[in-house]
Amino acid sequence: MDVDNEVVRLCAEGMRAEAENRPEDARLLFAQAWERRTDDYDACVAAHYVARQQESAEETLLWNAVSLHHANAAGDGRVRAFFPSLYLNMGASHELLGEPAEAERYFRLAADHAGDLPDDPYGDMLRQGIATALDRVAP
């Protein structure tokens, strides 16, 4: 990720606030990132983090869908490795809403894109999350 990008920087600060148990600060930082987006890449990143701070599964699904929409609209390699996480989040939202078939569809999409994940602890965590999610919903 581009640490010189203001939206990315704000989201990183928001993640730090989450880790320090300051959810309101995180919410404000993610909202600032959304307000300062300049293109679809920025919008994808900001919406991904705004989704984390929603109070209902419906709102979380909406923001996950916004993030996925902007990832598709960005149309370049900067978002390629985001798709497994975006699909995993969409699946999790549908699972929370009691829609297992739609959850499974998104979890399978996440698995289909898992090859784009980095070979590092973050990629390993997402691959494990995808496998676990599929185990929960697959017949």
Image (tube, rainbow, N blue to C red):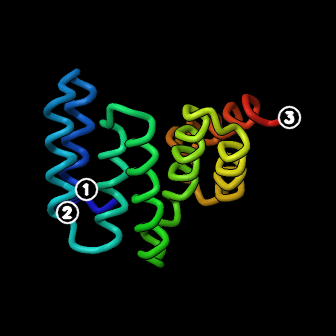
Q: Secondary structure at mark 2?
A: loop
Q: CA distance from mark 2 to mark 3?
A: 44 Å
Q: Is residue 78 above or below residue 59?
A: below
Looking at numbered disc 2 in the image, what kind of residue is underneath it? Asp
Looking at numbered disc 1 in the image, what kind of residue is underneath it? Val
Q: Earlier in the sequence, mark 1 or mark 3?
A: 1
Q: CA distance from mark 1 to mark 3?
A: 38 Å
Looking at numbered disc 3 in the image, what kind of residue is underneath it? Pro
| Image x and y of residue 52, in percent | 35, 38
- Kindly identify which residue carries mark 2: 4
Q: Nearer the viewer, residue 118 or 14?
A: 14
Residue depicted at 14% across the width and 33% down the height: 25
Judged from this view, the residue extending furthest toward the bottom is: 75
- Kindly identify which residue carries mark 1: 8
**Quick one: quadrant of the N terminus?**
bottom left
Look at the numbered discs 2 and 1 and tell me whether their residues touch, using CB distance below 8 Å.
Answer: yes
Residue depicted at 56% across the width and 36% down the height: 125
User: Along the horizontal axis of the image, is 127 left or right of 96?
Assistant: right
- Kindly identify which residue carries mark 3: 139
User: Along the horizontal axis of the image, is 108 left or right of 8?
Assistant: right
Look at the numbered discs 1 and 3 and tell me whether their residues touch, using CB distance below 8 Å.
Answer: no
